[in-house]
Each structure stands twice: as structure tokens, then as C-alpha cells.
Image (tube, rainbow, N blue to C red):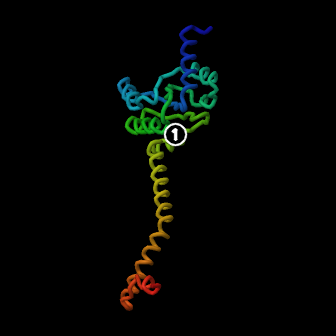
Amino acid sequence: MATPDKVAAVEEMTGKFRNSNAAVVTAYTGLSVAQLKQLRRSLGDNAQYRVVKNTLTKIAAKEAGVNELEEFLTGSTAVTFVTGDPVEAAKSLRDFAKDNPALEIKGGVLEGRALSADEIKKLADLESREVLLAKLAGGMKASMAKAAATFQAPLTKFVRTADALRAKQAEQGGADTSAPAEAAE
């Protein structure tokens, strides 16, 4: 028989699964309370790190339609619910795990797709969304500048050719450029 506390916990986690675009499951055995607090701070505002009970998490994940996590829910488990940029959260977890080997990334889910621990580490190696967008904008700007230069090149080439012809005529005989107008009189 389910207690009201457990029902409320399942409902809360179900909402977190539905509202997050990624969830990362970790094992935290061996981490102190101070280290867990440090991890939560390093994740920032776009992710929430929660120590969970496996049975309740399985029920909540199933109710939210996230069936890919069941294999990772064994032993001591904590879930990082990511509502912001998943790359930033993956980087924070990876960096914290480097300094604290007791944190083990088990796996996760990103927009309905199951991710292994290695895939989460590869995700952490990506640049952030802002950096990728800046690179895209820079590439597009460079393409537009190149196109503008290409469109301007024929006109510039024509002006240079006309100047070169005037200079050549001036060298060859000192011909006056207004000569055709005098001949017409």
C-alpha cells in the first residue's frame, strides 16, 4: 500500500521527467554531503541533482513515458534533471567526476533517447549551444561578406581597367581624353 509521501514523491519526479529535456543517472556512493552540495552548485540553475529511490523513480519514469532509464536504476542512485542546456550539465558532471572519482555516470536520456555513459561524456565534449550558434553566425557572416565581395568584383575590375586604359593612352601620345568632343565641332 502506497503512503501519501511516496505518492507525492512519484508525482513530483514524474513532473520533473516531463519538464526536463534530459536526465542523467549517477551513482554517488562515497561522496560526502559537502561534495554533493558542491556538485549541486556546479550544475547551476539549468539542472537539479536529486538522490532518489530506485523503485519510486522507475514508477515515475514509466508514468512520464521515459522507459529507457530502468537499466540504470540499481544501487545508490541520483538523477540530474536538466531543464537547460544538456551539454553544460554533462560538462559539469564530467568535470566533477574527474575531481571526485566516487561519482559514476551510469547513463541517461536526452529528448526520449537513451544515452550510455560514454555518450554522455561525448556530449560533454561538445561546445555549448551559445558557442555553436556564434560559430554558425560567424560562418554565415563570412559567407555574406564573400558574396558581397564577389558581386562588387566586376564593378571594381571595370573601374581599374578604365583607369589603366586612360593611363596607357596618356603614356602613348599624350592623347587628350576630350579629343572626340573637339572632333565633333
Residue 38 on image: x %, y %: 36, 28
Circle 1 sits on which residue? 120
User: What residue occupies the far front of the structure in this picture?
Assistant: 185
Using a 10 Å C-alpha cutoff, classify the residue at mark 1 as few (fewer than 14 neighbours), some (14 to 19) or many (20 or more): many
Answer above or below: position of 46 versus 173.
Answer: above
Residue 12 on image: x %, y %: 54, 17
**Looking at the rendering, in which quadrant would you find the N terminus?**
top right
User: What residue occupies the far bottom of the structure in this picture?
Assistant: 173
Q: Quadrant of residue 107?
A: top right
At x 59% / y 21%, what residue is drawn? Answer: 60
Answer above or below: position of 110 versus 135.
Answer: above
Amino acid bearing label 1: Ile
**Looking at the rendering, in which quadrant would you find the C terminus?**
bottom left
Q: Quadrant of residue 29?
A: top left
At x 50% / y 36%, what residue is drawn? Answer: 86
Front-lying residue, 146 or 157: 157
Residue 121 on image: x %, y %: 49, 42
Residue 39 on image: x %, y %: 40, 30
Answer above or below: position of 19 versus 122.
Answer: above
Give the side of residue 173 with respect to residue 87, left or right: left
Give the side of residue 80 with respect to residue 100, left or right: right
Front-lying residue, 130 or 2: 130
Front-lying residue, 61 or 138: 138
- How many marks the image carries: the answer is 1
Which element type, helix, strand or loop, lies under badge 1? helix
At x 44% / y 39%, what residue is drawn? Answer: 91
